[in-house]
Image (tube, coloured by chain):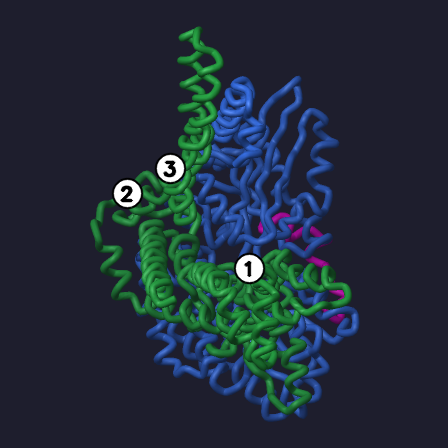
Chain colours: A blue, B green
Amino acid sequence: MKSTRKLFRTRGTAVISAVAALGLLSACGGGDTGGTGGGVKDGKTTITMGLFGVMGFKETGLLDEYMKQNPNVRIEAEIAGDEQTYYTALQNHLAAGSGLKDIQGIEIGRAKELVDKQADKFVDLSKVSGTDHFLPWKLSQVTGKDGKVIGLGTDIGPMAVCYRKDLFEQAGLPTDREQVAKLWDGDWAKFVAAGKDFKAGSKDGKVAFMDSASGLFNAMIYGNSEQFYDKGGKLIYKDSPVVKEAWNLASQAATTGLTAKLRQFQPGWDPGLANSTFATTVCPAWMLAHISEKAGPQNKGKWDVAKAPKGANWGGSFLGVMEKSPVKEEAKKLVAWLTAPEQQARLFEKLGNFPSSQKALEAPQVANAKSDYFSGAPIGQIFGAAAQEIPDEQVLGRKDGTIKDIFSQGLSLIESQNQSPEKAWKTTDERIEKAVG
Amino acid sequence: MATQTSTAAAGGQPAEEPAGPVRPARGRRQRRPDGRRSTLLHRLDVRGAPYAFIVPFFAVFAAFSFYPLIYTAWISLHRVELSSLDLMEWVAFDNYAALLQDERFWNALSNTITIGVLSTVPQLLMALGLAHLLNYRLRGSTFFRVAALTPYATSVGAAALVFTMLFERDFGMINWTLSLVGVDNVDWEGNKWAAQIAISTIVIWRWTGYNALLYLAAMQAIPRDRYEAAAIDGASRWQQFLKVTIPGIRPTIIFTIVLSTIGSTQLFGEPLIFGQGPNGITGGADNQYQTLGLLLYEEGWKNYQMGRAATVAWAMFLLLILVFALQRLLKRRSSRSS
């Protein structure tokens, strides 16, 4: 106390410090005016982008190339690693009306919610010229009832089955990708049956047939036009034969010990890849890069890719332009360029992000692509064929992403907590009720 | 917690502040009898300045603690989604009624309590032992004291991530070590008690050193002659510890108990990171280690139901007040008995 009194002995200091303290306070209050950070200054246009995960635009130098071609444009991209974090922030920014970028990435699981609830905050992209090259179902996922398109497609996630040739061989299963695909041709139940053969024939009891039951569940769900919701936006998972069948088959795999009880992209999964604890995983095209990185060079050539029983799509993203942006026209041009066939083909070559553009799919560098790591598998062909099999209309729902997570957890109740499938279904059902209500 | 310390501090300050500077002022006025204007200003300075000094604190408190507190209460009486914060549907106390009937709430509450006990009790006991050891004359005692404090300086994220890897089921180091003594694969994440012990371990690791230093400071304030007297009476080291040290640092022990209790009701970062991804938010597939903090997060940032999240927040706040009141009661009783 004494020292403070000495410090503020003179009236002047006291007043100044009080004013300074108040000044600091008001400085906190001001600031953000709700702009997007983009704008035109001294003839130079700045465009800001909010992205997540590895969308690849910055990583492959596409943004730099655009800036080189358009010297008057400067692009600032902010990339969040995790989509969940990104989307929560985006929701906050949309609600607050500040902190948004000129261009925002949209993940497929969030598309419906944004189309239904926030479409007025996005610019309509249906009339941007030269955007008629997408797969028929891609843009319908981000088209509102009034025909407004809130984003242009980047990649898609057609699915196949990645499998270990060496592990198949020791279990007495065929190893050639054509023959392997025949094992489960047309029916996921055959895939589980192959798993049982694998288990019976495997010499190493510690190696599981597949990584997780939820991978199988997702693949079965994603192959259908209607998943958890019907066209009217009504929740139908309870009575949907598709969901029921997927649940039954996945829980069968879980209870018969065919799975390694792992959670994809969670701790344990990567070391599982590196140490070969499972023989298959249902893999969308974008997962190949992850597998080759985490399974490491010691497993090169042991992996291969076979056609999945049914074509399905997991994931994919869009780029949208915000209504708030002061540089809408420039941003639209950039989005159209980034999603054009040439750029999509280049992203596929460099990163393996599978094109959503029909034209890019037909481009030779995509159609003829082979993967060294996966024993030279013709991935362009396999995933391209899967992409054509995906139903033309895919009904998305508002809470698709959340419901998918809840189902995955429900299956892990069976896998890791030894609950009965009936009990786990009941818990899952209650949780979904909570999450959507 | 922030709100409570602030109110407590706020209660004390204004009462003391004006009383202090008034006395010297009188002396100065006698020296300068004329100049009424300046006396007025001077009096304003003397009387007003203390209030001016504490204004920033109260302004910050009002803007960042009090207003959010009240606004959260207001939100908890509505049905609101994060994407449409301007659309609020009045539901009165429905959220509270639903929360009390919600299994997840009671599950989270009991998890919070069990993890709280699992982490606090060993932590404080170990801190006590550690402080006792540090209190001996040691070579390089400063080094040991700093070393004890390093875990506290580590960020929750880093510590939790490393522990999550150590506790990994198939290839984690802890399971590897356990396999050497014949304990087979413990599913640290999936099994309820294993998971709660693992999370408690992270908390214990981070906070033991901090508490030990608090105890050490208190121990050093105990006069040496008490130990000498005890030694003369024939008390052993252990008896000295029980009969001299423990009573001597009793207020500090109560303080650390209060702090740890408050900390454990707010446990959030450790289980969130320990679970990773969707399992982090729900505290495991079976909610086996979901704490109240995680339940709040799940309602708000997974289900995007701000009304329900605000209700959980207020339930936690009321719970803290309850704990606070209990602690006061306990303290009053203990001071009466001593």
Residue at 36%, 75% in the rendered image:
A425
Q: Where is residue A365 drawn, in percent x and y?
A: 73, 53
| Spatial separation of the CA atoms under disc 1 and disc 3 | 77 Å
SS of the residue at dot 1?
helix
Q: Are marks 2 and 3 in contact (CB under 8 Å)?
A: no
Q: Residues within 10 Å of mark 1 (few under 14, many from 20)?
A: some
Q: Where is residue A277 drawn, in percent x and y?
A: 65, 80
Task: Tell us which disc is closer to us: 1 or 3.
Answer: 3
Pointer 3 residue: B15
* In the foreground, B273 or A340: B273
SS of the residue at dot 2?
strand
Tell whether B87 sits left or right of B140: left
Magenta residues span A356-377
- Whether A358 is among the magenta residues is yes
| Spatial separation of the CA atoms under disc 1 and disc 2 | 44 Å
Type of amino acid at the residue the image marks with label 2:
Met
Q: Where is residue B304 drawn, in percent x and y?
A: 39, 52
* In the foreground, B195 or A265: B195
Pointer 2 residue: B88
| Spatial separation of the CA atoms under disc 2 and disc 3 | 42 Å
Pointer 1 residue: A388
Q: In the figure, residue A244 lies in which quadrant? A: bottom left
Task: Tell us which disc is closer to us: 1 or 2.
Answer: 2
Q: Residues within 10 Å of mark 3 (few under 14, many from 20)?
A: few
Q: Chain of mark 1?
A: A
Residue at 40%, 75% in the rendered image:
A245
Q: Where is residue A191 drawn, in percent x and y?
A: 54, 80
- Whether B180 is among the magenta residues is no
